[in-house]
Amino acid sequence: MAGGCRAARRSGRAPGRGCRRSPPPTSAARRAPRRLRDLRGRDLVFAVVLLVLVLVPFAVALFANGVFAAAILTASMAVMAATVSPERRGAVLGQILFPFYFGGVVGPLIGAAAFSAGQPVVFGIAAVLSLAPLIVLLTLPRESRHVRSA
């Protein structure tokens, strides 16, 4: 059959069905994965659009996280000012602000130790710290329900 293909090519006729040429062998450079610097034209535009579509929701979420984190501290101060007597406001203000500042000091230390120990340790510390409020809640003494006489 190969002779028929050669003859068809020499004469200018279209070769038959079984006369397809195999593609030339490709070099290792052509088969190598494409790098960011190799992106051109359409691929570069696609990469930029994809990056923008992915980063915009994260930027919005980060902005919302900052707003809500600021709202927690502001709301706690407003509740404290409305419910606590002026003589005790300093002590209550210290009790409210202590966890924020303590977390700001101890958090990076725990994060650095966890990062140096490896990723499973990071998730283990996060699990333990997530259970901490439950442990505090379960160890608090229950309130007695005495009815005060007026």
Image (cartoon, grey):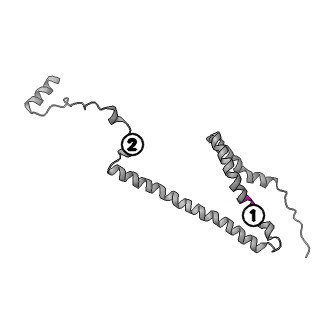
Three-letter code, disc 2? Arg
Q: Which residues are magenta?
A: 96-100
Q: Nearer the viewer, residue 91 or 3?
A: 91
Classed neighbour count for the residue bearing mark 1: other residues with Cα under 10 Å, few (<14), some (14–19), many (≥20): some
- The quadrant the N terminus occupies is top left
Most extreme residue toward the bottom is 150
**Rendering coords of residue 84 (x, y %):** 79, 72
Q: Is residue 132 left or right of residue 146?
A: left
Q: Is residue 97 magenta?
A: yes
Give the number of the disc on residue 86: none
**In this view, which residue lies farthest toward the left?**
11
Q: Please tell me which residue is depicted at 39% across the width and 51% down the height of the picture.
A: 47
Q: Residue at the right extreme?
A: 149
**Circle nearer the N terminus (1, 2):** 2
User: What kind of secondary structure does the magenta stretch mostly adopt?
Assistant: helix
Q: Is residue 1 visible?
A: no
> Is 37 left, or right, of 11 in this rendering?
right
Check disc 1 and report its element: helix, strand or loop: helix
Residue shown at 79% from the left, 70% from the top = 89
Viewer-closest of 91 and 135: 91
Residue 96: numbered disc? 1
The image shows residue 16 at horizontal and vertical percentages of 16, 31
Magenta stretch: includes residue 45: no
